Image (spheres, rainbow, N blue to C red):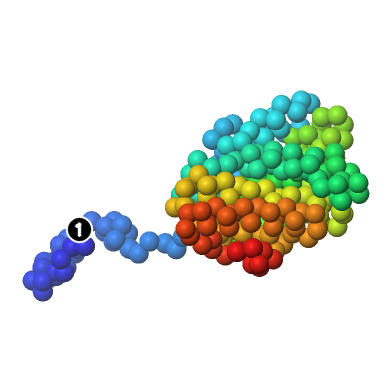
Amino acid sequence: MSAPLSPSDNANSNIHSELNDPSDAVSSAPPAAAAPEEPWSVRSALANLPTARPTSQSTSPLPFLHLLERLKTTKREGWRRFGITSGESISDHMYRMSIITMLAPPSLSSRLDVPHCTKMALVHDMAELLVGDITPMDQVPKEEKARREAETMEYLCGEEGLLGQWGRGEQGKGIRAIFEEYEESKTLESLFVHDVDKVELLLQMVEYEHRGEGELDLGEFSWVAQKVKLDGMKEWCREILRERVEFWKGLGKTASMLDMTTKEDA
């Protein structure tokens, strides 16, 4: 910061201002108010891509497949706040979820369309290739997040979208229907995949803590165990959190923010 002007400096400054070109008055005027930020749109997201915009209405699925690469390179944001900069990508998360669906507890697998669940696990975060991984810390309202994701799925799978001309658009419709089923959370399959989503997060939480050798406490993520709905999956959560307790006990420390359903194990 510059030193304040003395009275004589102010006088000289005023005289100098009067002799300056009138255009100086424009340059020294207060800056105009910033234009309001545009609402998020697929168009704006595409404009910020580091690669060329995909070709819509292609008779090939290749533009869609190229865009899917973003799921491999976009990181899951929640971990980055803890300095985990080389953490999992969105597709890493969905891949393990898809395997978990194939290993559904017997009490659930007999009632589930497991192949359908596997597809849902692979599709449920697809919109994040443009929307990004929005976390509660971003303070984006739930309705706004849903709008962005629906607009993205329309761009990917709608009649005018990237898959609109491939296979008469039927595959695109099928992908979007699975995505919407997950979002609506009404079928047993969608409830199961929501639980799988949380189980995968808990697994990753524990694995990062192990990697941190006791210097990384990710306990704030353990609350998701309370959101798991199906009994078979609740037991998996309890097992993961018991494993976490034992890890921290072995270090002579106490795990933070345990799920209340496992407090008797702490």
Q: Vertical placement of 197 versus 69: above or below?
A: below
Q: Is residue 75 left or right of residue 4?
A: right
The C terminus appears in which quarter of the rendering?
A: bottom right
Please give the name of the residue rendered at 8% of the width and 71% of the height, measured from the top-left corner. Answer: 8
Q: Vertical placement of 38 versus 53: above or below?
A: below
Please give the name of the residue rendered at 71% of the width and 32% of the height, measured from the top-left corner. Answer: 64
Q: Position of residue 131 (x, y in %)?
A: 63, 48
Q: Position of residue 121 (x, y in %)?
A: 75, 43
Give the farthest residue toward the left: 8
Q: Is residue 56 left or right of residue 164?
A: left
Please give the name of the residue rendered at 64% of the width and 63% of the height, measured from the top-left corner. Answer: 265
Q: Position of residue 224 (x, y in %)?
A: 66, 60
Disc 1 residue type (three-letter): Asn
Of residues 222 and 122, the one nearer the viewer is: 222
Q: Is residue 56 left or right of residue 107?
A: left
Give the farthest residue toward the right: 111
Q: Can you identify the residue that label 1 sits on?
A: 20
Of residues 6 and 64, the one nearer the viewer is: 64
Of residues 14 and 150, the one nearer the viewer is: 150
Residue 171 position by quadrant:
top right
Q: Position of residue 107 (x, y in %)?
A: 87, 51
Q: Is residue 254 visible?
A: yes
Secondary structure beneath disc 1? loop
